[in-house]
Amino acid sequence: MSLRHFLTLMDLSPDELVGLIQRAIELKANHARGQVHTPLNRKVMAMIFEKASTRTRVSFESGMSQLGGHAIFLSPNDTQLGRGESVEDSARALSGMVDIIMVRTFEHDKIQRFADAASVPVINALTDLYHPCQLLADVMTWVEQRGEIRGRTAAWIGDGNNMCHSWMNAARQFDFKLRIATPEGYGPDPDLLQACAGQVELMSDPQAAVAGADLVVTDVWASMGQESEQAARMAEFAPFQVNETLMTQAGDNALFMHCLPAHRGEEVSAGVIDGPQSVVWQEAANRLHGQKALLEFLLR
Ligand code: CP
Ligand code: NVA
C-alpha cells in the first residue's frame, strides 16, 4: 500500500472516515469485553510534542500499547530537533527506526515538511491550523449518542482556531451543516471558509448560530502559543460564552462538546460543561478508540 499520512481530515476519503468511525466503535466494544487485539505487535511510534498535552499523549501511548506496539515520547528539550536539527533530517532519521510518527507542533507547514521528508506515516496531533484526531473522537461521540451526523446542524461558538478548522473539514467530509459565530477579527481562515461554502456559514451572533442546532461546540479563547493575548481575548470573547441561556436557543436534544482542556467561566459555564447535555468525558475517552482505528488503518 502507498504511504498515507493524516495531517488533516481531507487526507482520507469520506468513505474511509466513516469506516474508521465504525471501526473505532467496534474496537471500543471489543476492548470493553476484554478482547486482546495486538495487530501492531512490535510496531513502534515516535511521538514528537512541541506543545503540552494530556489526552493526546496518553491516548496514543495507551493505544499503541493495547495494539501490541510501543510509543516513544520525544520533547524538544531532549531532542536535536529542539537544538536546531532540520525538520527534514529529523523526519528521515526517525523514519529509519520507527513505523509511524505523531507530531504536535506550531506551524502547520512544519508538519507538512516533516511528512514530505518521512517514509513512514505521519499523524497530525495538533498544529496551529488543525486538530484532526480530535474530530475522530468527536464524530464518534456524536454517532454513539445520536446516530448518523450527515444532514445535522452543528454550531461552533468562539475562536476560529485549529479546532474550528477541523470542524469545518468534518462538515465537508461527513456532510453536515456548521454555523460558526466568532468575534470580529477572530474568524476562521478565509480560503478554508470559501472551500467549505456549501456546508459552513460564518455569523457574528452566537444566538443565531445555535438556533435549533443539534450540537454546540466551543474551545478555549486563547490556544497554546497565544498566552500573551489571553487578557485582550477575554474581553472580546465574553459575549461568546456557551452558557445555559445560549443553550436554550439550541435544539431540545442538543449535545455540548469541548475538546478540553476547558476554562469554566470563560468559554463555557460550569452549568453547561458539567450539565446533562455535555458529552465531554465521552469525547476524551474516545480519543483512545478513534486513534487506535487510525493506527490500524495507517499501518495495515
Ligand atoms: N484535546 C486535546 O488534544 O487535549 P490535550 O491537549 O490534553 O492532548
Ligand atoms: N485550540 C486549543 C486546542 C487544545 C487541544 C489549542 O490549540 O490550544
Image (cartoon, rainbow, N blue to C red):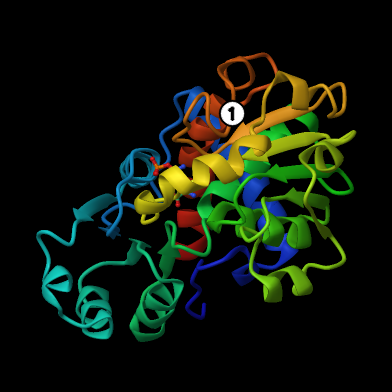
Q: Position of residue 28 (x, y in %)?
A: 54, 33
Q: Position of residue 20 (x, y in %)?
A: 62, 52
Q: Quadrant of residue 153?
A: top right
Q: Is 33 displayed left or right of 190 in the figure?
A: left
Q: Position of residue 59 (x, y in %)?
A: 39, 40
The secondary element bearing badge 1 is classed as loop
Q: Position of residue 45 (x, y in %)?
A: 29, 59
Q: Residue at x 30, y 54 (%)?
A: 51
Give the amino acid type for the residue marked by disc 1 in the picture.
Answer: Val
Q: Which residue is mark 1?
A: 268
Q: In this rendered view, identify the residue nearer to me: 94 or 266.
A: 266
Q: Residue at x 84, y 60 (%)?
A: 199
The answer to whether residue 258 is visible is: yes
Q: Is 95 displayed left or right of 5 in the figure?
A: left
Q: In this rendered view, identify the residue nearer to me: 118 or 181.
A: 181
Q: Is 36 displayed left or right of 199 in the figure?
A: left
The answer to whether residue 220 is visible is: no
Q: Ligand 1, what quadrant?
A: top left
Q: Is 294 displayed left or right of 87 in the figure?
A: right
Against 140, residue 11 (above or below) is below
Q: In this rendered view, identify the residue nearer to me: 149 or 182.
A: 182
Against 41, residue 218 (above or below) is above
